[in-house]
C-alpha cells in the first residue's frame, strides 16, 4: 500500500504538466504581495502630497527603494502569470500567441521602467 498526498497525485497532470508548479507560484506570490503591498502603500501614502525633494528623499533610502522594487517585480510577475493563464483559457490560435507575447513584453517593460526610475532616484 502506497501513501500518496494530494499534491503528489496532482503533479504531472494537466496539458503542460506544470499546473501544480504554477498554482504554488501564484499562491506564494499572492501571500508575499499581501504583506508587501500594505507596507508599500503606507510608505507611498506618507510621501504622497509632499514636495518633490521630500519624495526623492523618501525613495532614496534603502528600505523604501528595495520595497518598491520588490512590489514592482513580484506584482508584475504575478500579473504576467495570471494574465497568461486567462489568455490560455479564453483565446485560441494566433491571437492567443500575440496576446501572450504582448502581456509578457508589457510586464517586463513596466519592470524595466520602474527599476530605471528607482535607480535614477537612488543615484
Image: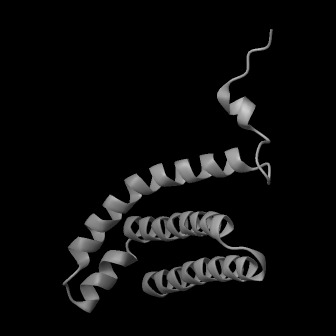
Tell me if residue 123 can be seen.
no
Going by the image, does 41 lie left or right of 119? left
Nearest the viewer among 72 and 84 is 84
Q: In this view of the protein, which residue sits in the foreground, 69 or 105?
A: 105
Q: Toward the viewer: 61 or 103?
A: 103
Query: Is 121 displayed left or right of 112 in the figure?
Result: left
Q: Is residue 59 above or below residue 70?
A: below
Identified at 24% across, 77% down, the residue is: 47
Quarter of the image where one finds residue 92 = bottom right
Q: Residue at x 29, y 83 (%)?
A: 55
* Horizontal and vertical percent position of residue 111: 56, 78
Question: From where the camera sits, is residue 42 visible?
Answer: yes
Looking at this view, is 103 or 49 the one in front? 103
| Residue 25 place in picture, x, y as percent | 61, 51
Image location (x, y in percent) of residue 22:
66, 52
In the image, residue 98 lies at what x, y percent?
72, 83
Q: Quadrant of the N terminus?
A: top right
Position of 97 compared to 30: left or right? right
Compared with 40, 113 (above or below) is below
Where residue 110 sits, quadrant-wise, is: bottom right
Amino acid at each position: 500500500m502506497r501513501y500518496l498526498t494530494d499534491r503528489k497525485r496532482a503533479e504531472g497532470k494537466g496539458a503542460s504538466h506544470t499546473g501544480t508548479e504554477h498554482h504554488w507560484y501564484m499562491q506564494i506570490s499572492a501571500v508575499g504581495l499581501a504583506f508587501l503591498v500594505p507596507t508599500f502603500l503606507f510608505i507611498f501614502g506618507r510621501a504622497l502630497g509632499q514636495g518633490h525633494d521630500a519624495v526623492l528623499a523618501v525613495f532614496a533610502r534603502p528600505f523604501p527603494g528595495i520595497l518598491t522594487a520588490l512590489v514592482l517585480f513580484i506584482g508584475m510577475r504575478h500579473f504576467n502569470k495570471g494574465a497568461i493563464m486567462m489568455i490560455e483559457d479564453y483565446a485560441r490560435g494566433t491571437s492567443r500567441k500575440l496576446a501572450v507575447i504582448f502581456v509578457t513584453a508589457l510586464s517586463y517593460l513596466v519592470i524595466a521602467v520602474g527599476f530605471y526610475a528607482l535607480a535614477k532616484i537612488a543615484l
